Amino acid sequence: MAAGTTRFCAGIVSTARHVSIELKMADYSNKLYQQLEQETGVQTGYMKTGSISLAQTQDRLISLKRIASSLNVMGIPCEIITPKQVAQLHPLINIHDLVGAMYVPEDALVSSANVSLALATAASRNGVQIHERTSVSHVLIQKGRVTGVETDRGKIQCQYFVNCAGQWAYELGHSGDEPVSIPLHACEHFYLLTHPLKEPLASSVPTIVDPDGRIYIRNWQGGILSGGFEKNPKPLFTEGRNQLEIQNLQEDWDHFEPLLSSLLRRMPDLEALQIMQLVNCPESFTPDMRCIMGESPTVRGYFVLAGMNSAGISYGGGAGKYLAEWMVNGYPSENVWPLDLKRFGTLQSSRTFLRHRVMEVMPLMCDLKVPRWDFQTGRQLRTSPLYDRLDAQGARWMEKHGFERVKYFVPPGKDLLDLDQSKTFYKPDWFDIVGSEVKCCKEAVCVIDMSSFTKFEISSTGDQALESLQYLFSNDLDVPVGHVVHTGMLNEKGGYENDCSIARLSKRSFFMISPTDQQVHCWAWLKNRLPNDSNLTMEDVTWKYTALNLIGPRAVDVLSELSYAPITPEHFPSLFCKEMSVGYANGIRVMSITHTGEPGFMLYIPIEYALHVYNEVMNMGQKYGIRNAGYYALRSLRIEKFFAFWGQDLDAFTTPMECGREFQVKLDKGMQFVGQEALLEQKQNGVYKRFTMFILEDHDTDMDLWPWWGEPIFRNGRYVGKTTSSAYSYTLERHVCLGFVHHFDEKTGEELVVTTDFINQGEYEIDIAGQRFQAKAKLYPFSSLFTQRRRKDEVELSGYQRE
């Protein structure tokens, strides 16, 4: 047990995390380890020391303040302190270059090997059999389900298998009858141990995290344990050469030197200290710095928990809890989508990609992560056929699920380098560029390449497709051919597993459009639930179609001139789908929907025609003031229209009733569908959270910190929820935040029903890095502020109805 990285890990339990679910896991781990010794009788070395995260720059301090806001509303004690206070808490620390710090008094230290032993002891007492020094050579799979494992001591039959093999998880994943892709890669990780100081450090001295210096420092038997995340990491085992146990790898003092220098700058008194050992142990890292958990999309009963990115001891307890819930109940008690194995596709399992990406990821552990930063490695992997054309016109790119998507277009003459390197928590340099793209969407016509959308075709020889989809989706899909339905794909609790648009192409054929990162998750969800019928087929056609979003009041003029077909609302009502010719190209699926609430059309173009159709649209659009636009403009438009997006606002724990979408559910049609019972109960008893729109009132866009997402929401001074997405509305000239409001009983903390009155009668504030800004709350879009009369089709397009 604990023969891998765990045996050598630094044993720091830290709750200071950016991602909400990671923060919750670390908090649970801390509380679990605290009581383990008492429960099991095994000493775990648990010591509550607290931790101090140092800031050498103002931007770093802002980042820490954002984390502190999250910790405080979760009930985890935390404060932003001055350099002088740092010196009082840890007298050996050099504070001359610090601007502040964050102190989390309940963070702790443990002996990770002993924690493993304590957990194993408790498991054994409850009937778990543990076979040490037993290697798994093969996972047995039949009909897409786990049936057992082959070990060097014989076969073991099982229904569930959990791959917790750390840096060997990738190889173990490929050793089954059906390979399971687990994208992680090992890097060498160094830390040094010293002999005790002349005056040995007290065991209660806080752990120091110095991200700008790339190091961490903790007490170790009266001396120091200090490691870090260098800028030039050393990946290893790329070819798969592995030992069963990690024998201590070679010391490399030259490689460790920058981290040692950083340590001596931070603790100058260590110059004379005797170093005992430089430990080199591999750690596994993932492509997005978040751990991997959940069930395989291809093999039922095959679960994964690996890729801890050097935070295994912090996450271990919480991650184990959520995975156990997942296996026993079919779902965990929190939204773990940010960690779900299904967020990755097979494209992330290339060893070359993983090797290059972890060389970027490991330094990023310490780098300042401002909003909207992007990975630089493993790029241009999945691209639209228009990539080169758009790139030549100044496109700036971001990546989603391996797909390149345009953020915005840099106009000719702008300093490109400056723009690419501008990273800030304040007003970004692209502000005016995106503003002009939004203006063009409102007044003329814009083109956004949205080819990354996940696209499935589901068809059958009889009524099987309709019958199956009617049960799996919450809105009524038995609509006339040519109609588009916006619908949720719900779980048994009524939560959104997916939010999509489905067009009925014919009596027996449907075209389904989902978010980009749904490609693996949605496929697995449907595959596991559609009947095993040879007359029913589902095909992933994501790569077959380029998608162009034509947004704006003049989109109708461009399209009608290119197709010689009437496109007026009488001939082409909203939420409608027609196959048309555009220019010389046939078979273009045109839908009257833009995902923004603005008028316009989505064009799904067979990829061989993509360049032709794009050129025709741009040429014809010249006289209407056409221009390219990107996803930042789209975000601004959809947020000011109060549009919820899956993965940001909607998740498996959010129901249509909680976000004003009751009208998209067939509750009154006498048809059974997944999640129906949960929604009927909510309809009768009310909801415990409500999706709400906030307009910041006293916020200065030019001078104040911007909201991005995850900011705490306060109602009458009490914490009630967090924002899920936000954007600047160029129409309202204000920041708009979307988020969920809960109602907690002031005395018991119990959740109460959230009524419309409760929302409307509160005074709201949004906390941005510790500073609160007044906000006005609304339960319907603000369109009425800037258009006195909303056209009927616009209401349908926006997917919302006035309350």
Image (spheres, grey):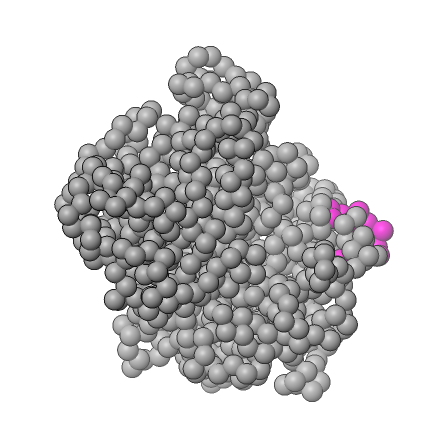
| Residue 103 in sight from this viewpoint | yes
- In the image, 345 versus 653, the foreground residue is 653
Would residue 11 appear left or right of 459 to someone viewing this image? left
x and y percentages locating residue 620 in the rendered image: 47, 78
The residue lying furthest to the top in this view is 154
- In the image, 659 versus 109, the foreground residue is 109
Quadrant position of residue 500: bottom right
The C terminus appears in which quarter of the rendering?
bottom right
Q: Main secondary structure of the magenta part?
A: loop
Bounds of the magenta span?
Answer: 665-676
How many numbered marks does the figure carry? 0
- In the image, 295 versus 226, the foreground residue is 226
Would residue 35 appear left or right of 395 to someone viewing this image? right
Q: Answer above or below: position of 539 versus 505.
A: above
Q: Residue at x 45, y 31 (%)?
A: 43
The residue lying furthest to the front in this view is 199
x and y percentages locating residue 108 in the rendered image: 43, 46
Would residue 142 appear left or right of 803 to someone viewing this image? left
Q: Residue at x 51, y 40 (%)?
A: 34
Residue 667 colored in magenta in the image: yes
Residue 743 colored in magenta in the image: no
Q: Answer above or below: position of 249 versus 691.
A: above
The N terminus appears in which quarter of the rendering?
top left
Quadrant position of residue 105: bottom left
x and y percentages locating residue 379 in the rendered image: 34, 55
x and y percentages locating residue 480 in the rendered image: 74, 59
Q: Residue at x 69, y 42 (%)?
A: 461
Q: Residue at x 82, y 57 (%)?
A: 685
Q: Answer above or below: position of 580 versus 366.
A: below
| Residue 561 in sight from this viewpoint | no
